[in-house]
């Protein structure tokens, strides 16, 4: 039986998105300083946008708004993945760094899709 959801913090998708954001901050800590206001900032912003939009949507207490914020979170995930791939292509990040982050992002994306479907059918 699923646990009771009293807060957005109880959502596994939010928890996983928070873990991803923390992993992104750790991974980008050693990126070149001249990228701080470029790709580093973009990657971090996209990563933090995911749990923020999940939480904001939950707070709306309206199913349609909630789903829209979850879709925005999905968009931020795809933005994050694209920034990570760019960072790999330009030599800022190694494939060993990018691959687990991409896997984590894809996992969060699956959870988001499941939650959107559940809200659509319920």
Image (cartoon, rainbow, N blue to C red):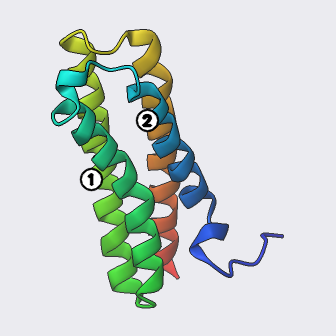
Task: Residue at 30%, 27% (x, y): give it.
Answer: 84
Residue 27's x, y, as percent? 44, 26
Horizontal arrangement in the rendering, residue 68 relative to residue 1 (left or right): left
Task: Residue at 24%, 21% (x, y): give it.
Answer: 87
Question: Label 1 vs label 2: CA separation?
Answer: 17 Å
Horizontal arrangement in the rendering, residue 10 relative to residue 18 (left or right): right
Q: Nearer the viewer, mark 1 or mark 2?
A: 2
- CB-based contact (under 8 Å), mark 1 and mark 2: no
Nearest the viewer among 42 and 76 is 42
- Give above or below for 40 relative to 60: above
Horizontal arrangement in the rendering, residue 47 relative to residue 3 (left or right): left
Nearest the viewer among 53 and 115 is 53
Residue 112's x, y, as percent? 46, 57
The residue at which mark 2 appears reads as 24
Furthest-front residue in this view: 33
Task: Residue at 51%, 65% (x, y): give it.
Answer: 115
**Quadrant of the rendered image containing residue 95:** top left
The residue at which mark 1 appears reads as 75
Earlier in the chain: of badge 1 and badge 2, it is: 2
Q: Secondary structure at mark 2?
A: helix
Residue 24's x, y, as percent? 43, 35
Q: Quadrant of the N terminus?
A: bottom right
Q: Is residue 100 visible?
A: yes
Q: Is residue 120 visible?
A: no
- Crowd band around label 2 with a 10 angstrom C-alpha radius: few (<14), some (14–19), many (20+): many
Furthest-bottom residue in this view: 61
Furthest-right residue in this view: 1
Q: Secondary structure at mark 1?
A: helix
**Quadrant of the rendered image containing residue 13:** bottom right
């Amino acid at each position: 039986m699923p646990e009771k959801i009293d807060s957005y913090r109880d959502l596994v998708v939010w928890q996983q998105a928070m873990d991803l954001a923390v992993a992104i901050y750790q991974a980008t800590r050693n990126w070149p300083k001249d990228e701080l206001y470029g790709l580093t900032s973009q990657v971090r912003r996209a990563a933090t946008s995911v749990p923020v939009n999940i939480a904001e949507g939950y707070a709306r207490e309206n199913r349609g708004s909630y789903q829209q914020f979850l879709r925005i979170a999905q968009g931020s995930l795809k933005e994050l993945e694209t920034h990570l791939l760019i960072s790999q292509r330009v030599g800022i990040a190694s494939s060993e760094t990018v691959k687990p982050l991409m896997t984590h992002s894809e996992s969060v994306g699956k959870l988001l899709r499941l939650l959107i479907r559940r809200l659509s059918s319920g």
